Image (spheres, rainbow, N blue to C red):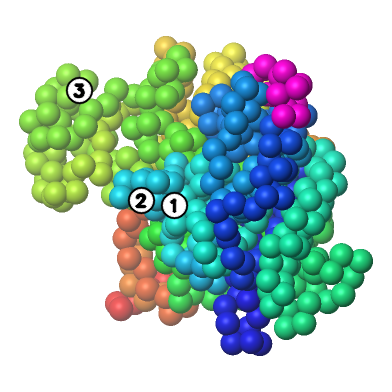
Amino acid sequence: MDSPAAGIRTLTVTVDARLSAHVPGYVLGLIALPEIDVVEDAPAVAAQLTAAEDSLHAERLTKADVSALPAIAAWRDAYRAVGVNPNRFPCAAESVLRRVAKGDRLPRINSLVDLCNAVSLDSRLPVASCDVGGIEDELHVRLAHGTETYLPLGAPDAPEQPEPGEVVYADGRGRAHSRRWNWRQGDVVKTGTGRRRILLTVESAHEGGRDDVERALGRLTDTLAGLVPKRGALWCSTGPRRRERCSEPRRPRRSADPARVDARDSYDSHEEHRMNRSILVVYRPAAGRYAAQFRSVVAAATDLGVRTVVLLPAGEQAPEADGLPQYHADLEDTASVRAVVDRIVAEHRIERIFPLFEGDVLPASRCRRDHGIPGLTPDQALNFRDKNVMHRRAEELGVRVARSCRPDTVTTVARFADEVGYPVVVKPYAGWACGNTYRVDSREELDRVWEEMGDDRHEYRVEEFVRGTEFHVDSLFQGGEVVFEQLSQYTYSVLEYRDEPGGTISRKYGLSPREQRILELNAVVLRGFGLSTGVVHAEFFLLDDGEVVFGEAGARAGGGSIVPAIEAGRGINLAGEWCRLELDPDHRPAARLGPEIGTEYLASGEYGRITAITTSAELMALDAVLDADVWKSVGDVLAPPTRSNDVLGWYVCEGTDFEDVRTRFKTVRDAFRVETEQA
């Protein structure tokens, strides 16, 4: 707001780019008054306010009439779009219009507040005066994190915290200066009399609103010309730009209206990036498990003319991300992730966030909420990340799940095991890849596992062991509809990953009614979990009596070799298709049926330092092998696996049916060799 060249402060006003996703027609107009003497009464202003009230009285509008005014109706829609009930929390313009329409007059506050009320009544737009003398550097119109402090107008000793996701005017110190967009102003920015540093705001949400905002700004500047001292200046601009810098020019430029200064050359260095459509990929490059998915998402975005921004774990580099904007955060610390994403969104026009790893799904959802980015919300993400929530929600949808209990005490678990019968499964409620998951076959084993869990037992849940054939469904959704689904059958028990390599074979042809039922229940679960557009890997059990039991679901592409297996067999990459579906509402996956496809992890019973190992090229030379990736090499040290994906690599092969593929698995397994020495 003030000129850096003059050695005084500059205030930059930013609008969260994601607001346009909720309210495409939002326009923000600004007038900066670096210095103005606000008086209690100005005759010209008093006359305008009285005239505006008289005019509205003559219209005899009812409360319903006010709500139906085009500008107000648009604000009510805008409030609903960001999750606010406009009946309980009307926008500022609707509040003053309702009050005056009843026949009342507005209280006279001071010359500047009264002027804003007069223009608001005439224009039907929210118009506000903000004293920004106590705000440094930046003011953001954005979605609240829920951690900000708001001091209510007239009650600064009773601080509040905005609801996460509501729109606020917030500064860089974590203070919110409004509630629910413009419903209430905060005490810090209230305009009093005396010499003040003021920012006037005019907002619209309706189609064609820019012209109305321009007219309101003109009304304000016409009156303000007689109120601003000659040594001062006005700075005026309209949105919806992502970032506006309000600064007092050293010499105000001459124009048809000498009180107005063009803002178009006031953008900061980030504006070019913010004008480009961008996505954010949360990517963990360790072990290369997600490299192919990452490349596919980048390629899909590039095809659509969208830039990829990458968020990596602190201290890690990814050669495959070279040439792309890269940021780093402690991905195990949600607060760190959200803080870095705040910076990313300030510098890039992020339209979607893609977490490739299951552990990043919930933090990504919170970042979406912070910035109004479409996709899974935290409430929806919990259905996919918290197995306690997941199973309760599935039960509500009428889908059978394993019986379970909380491990509050060892006696509780022992009684549960006696009720359902051993074995039982003890697992983290928010885990992945069977890490820290135990199959418990007896009370003695339960006591041992209980000691291993220690005081972390609140992070676990206990389930009955479901005896049945295990399946998984990999799905793509768009707009709440299934646009791709692939049923596959595991060739092993997922919990027995230590004893045999993990394998899975597609089921495309001749599905039984029971297998069809799995696909039907998969759609029920995913819709019930709130998925609109995205990719999901879900697991089910088919019991001998024909009953289907839901296991779990992850809002991400299947891990390990599932993505390359589906690409080899169906011709689409799940991660890349997810990106296309999010960015292009008209896209539909062009999948083929093809032969049955199987994939299996590569494993070895040898431990120690690797001295020799079969390569990917050697595996792909085998008959019917379509793809392979060996993650280990000579010199690496092998230890017993601790997770189901703690393996040496994978391969994909084709066959005529389920049994033919299983036979080919054995051929490849026999050809894979690993030699080690003591490390």
Tag 2 near tag 3, CB within 8 Å: no
Mark 2 or mark 3, which is nearer to you? 2
- Horizontally, residue 596 falls left or right of residue 593, namely left
Mark 1 or mark 3: name the one nearer the start of the chain. Answer: 1
Residue 517: percent from the left, percent from the top? Answer: 56, 17
Q: Nearer the viewer, residue 424 or 430?
A: 430
What distance separates the C-alpha of mark 1 from that of mark 3?
62 Å
The part of the chain drawn in magenta is: 54-69
List the residue tagged with mark 2.
156
Q: Up-down: is 594 above or below 73?
A: below
Q: Nearer the viewer, residue 164 or 610?
A: 164
Report the disc number at residue 187: 1
- Other-residue count near label 1 (Cα within 10 Å), few / some / many at <14 / 14–19 / ≥20: some
Q: Which residue is at a point 47% across and 17% down the rendered structure image? A: 397
Tell me which label, 1 or 2, sits earlier in the chain: 2
Q: Position of residue 395 (x, y in %)?
A: 40, 19
User: Residue at position x 50%, y 56% from top?
Assistant: 192
Q: Position of residue 178 (x, y in %)?
A: 51, 48
In which quarter of the view is residue 15 placed?
Answer: bottom right
Find out whether the residues at labels 1 and 2 contact each other: C-beta distance under 8 Å: yes
Camera-side residue: 182 or 438? 182
* Residue kind at label 1, given as amino acid type: Asp
User: Which residue is outermost to the front?
Assistant: 43
Numbered badge on residue 421: 3
Farthest residue, direction right: 256
Three-letter code for the amino acid on which mark 3 is drawn: Gly
Q: Amino acid at mark 2?
A: Pro
Q: Is residue 489 above or below residue 264?
A: above
